[in-house]
Image (tube, rainbow, N blue to C red):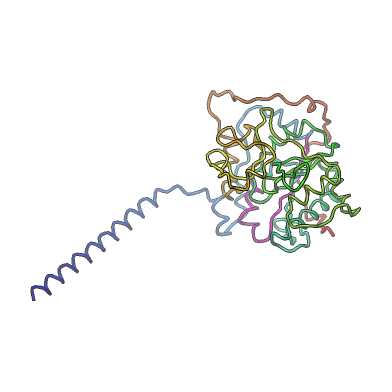
Amino acid sequence: MAFISGRNSWLAFMLGMLIGFFTIFLLVHNITHSFRVKAPVAIRSWKTIEDMALLEKVPHVHQPGSSKVSDDLSQKVRVLCWIMTGPSNLYTKAIHLKYSWTRHCNVVLFMSSTTNTSFPTIGLETKEGRDQLYWKTIRAFQYVHKNYYDQADWFLKADDDTYIVVDNLRWMLSNYTPDQPVYFGKRFKPFAKQGYMSGGAGYVLSKEALNRFVKGFDTGVCQHTTSVEDLALGQCMEKMGVIAGDSRDTEKRETFHPFPPESHLTGHFDKSFWYWSYCFYPIVEGPQCCSDLAISFHYIDPTWMHGLEYLVYHLRAYGYDHRYQPPLPEAAGRLPVTHEKKPAPDIKANETSSS
């Protein structure tokens, strides 16, 4: 009997310990959760699709200061941004680009496999999947050439998980004129004599480069030979005499990046990693990896589109003179002001699909 009584006491003790531990765990969890800072409703709402219009209320104002140089460049270096996306990504990824960095573009177009008039997106009459990326790219550039050729000087392609600092892009592009057959991005080297630009980091074609790309398919010089979008486009560029440009800054630091900022700044790429054999220019790891006038980063979490927008356009260190202030290129002074900056045209009004 003593043995049974002792055993029951031990079981009661262990049960009490478990109940007590579980109670304390719930109490601590509830306390810490109650103090957890929640994202503003305008950013949170996309997760429940309760009211997507709330994202329009995310402020897009900048602190008082001189933006004359960037304002002038926005009229001289007109950039059309088209975003490669898909139906399932519109309200999980693309919506955050729509209300963050794409507002700095002169024209913004979202390209998908099917048309969505409410977002809106342009349907390219393709299927979805990685094997369709080059078809989407071909038809997107054909559509832009047909409908927006005179509304921009440079034509940027970006994925729906890429962040672009459009003002830094304009600074880099102001070294050139849109009649030059050139395109820029994160330059890789295998499989093409002059290299090609990473698709994830984004790439930008001059007006002449766009013209030659479309002509390449009209004449049969370029064809859909592989689904590897960025390589295929680079091979077509090479055939059409379009130069793979050097987008590094005056200190020879990269501006287009195929990974998030933390990967380049604090990460370490193993020597067996494909990145070492792909990069056209020497890889630099750590703080000197990236230009102070960086243009793009890839694999950005959707809500971090707003975080980067804040860090780029709002956060400042008081009393700090920026260490890197390259002069505006001389060529920028000779660029004509063609049109004042206008909002993106209403896609619904002239919706067509490229063949």
Q: Which residues are magenta?
A: 77-99
Q: Quadrant of the N terminus?
A: bottom left
**94 drawn magenta:** yes
Q: Nearer the viewer, residue 318 or 214?
A: 214
**212 drawn magenta:** no
Image coordinates for residue 244, horizontal then vertical, percent:
78, 40
* Residue 133, picture quadrant: bottom right
Q: What residue occupies the far left of the structure in this picture?
A: 2
Q: Nearer the viewer, residue 71 or 143?
A: 143
Q: Nearer the viewer, residue 268 or 160?
A: 268
Residue found 75% across the figure and 30% down from its top: 72
* Residue 102, picture quadrant: top right
Q: Count of labels shown?
A: 0
Residue found 26% across the figure and 63% down from its top: 18
Left or right: residue 229 versus residue 5 is right
Image coordinates for residue 154, horizontal then vertical, percent:
79, 41
Residue found 73% across the figure and 33% down from its top: 172
Q: Is residue 83 above or below residue 245?
A: below
Image coordinates for residue 309, horizontal then vertical, percent:
60, 40
Q: What residue occupies the far bottom of the structure in this picture?
A: 1
Residue found 64% across the figure and 45% down from its top: 258
Q: Quadrant of the C terminus?
A: bottom right
Q: Is residue 133 above or below residue 105?
A: below
Q: What residue occupies the far right of the structure in this picture?
A: 219
Q: What residue occupies the far front of the structure in this picture?
A: 272
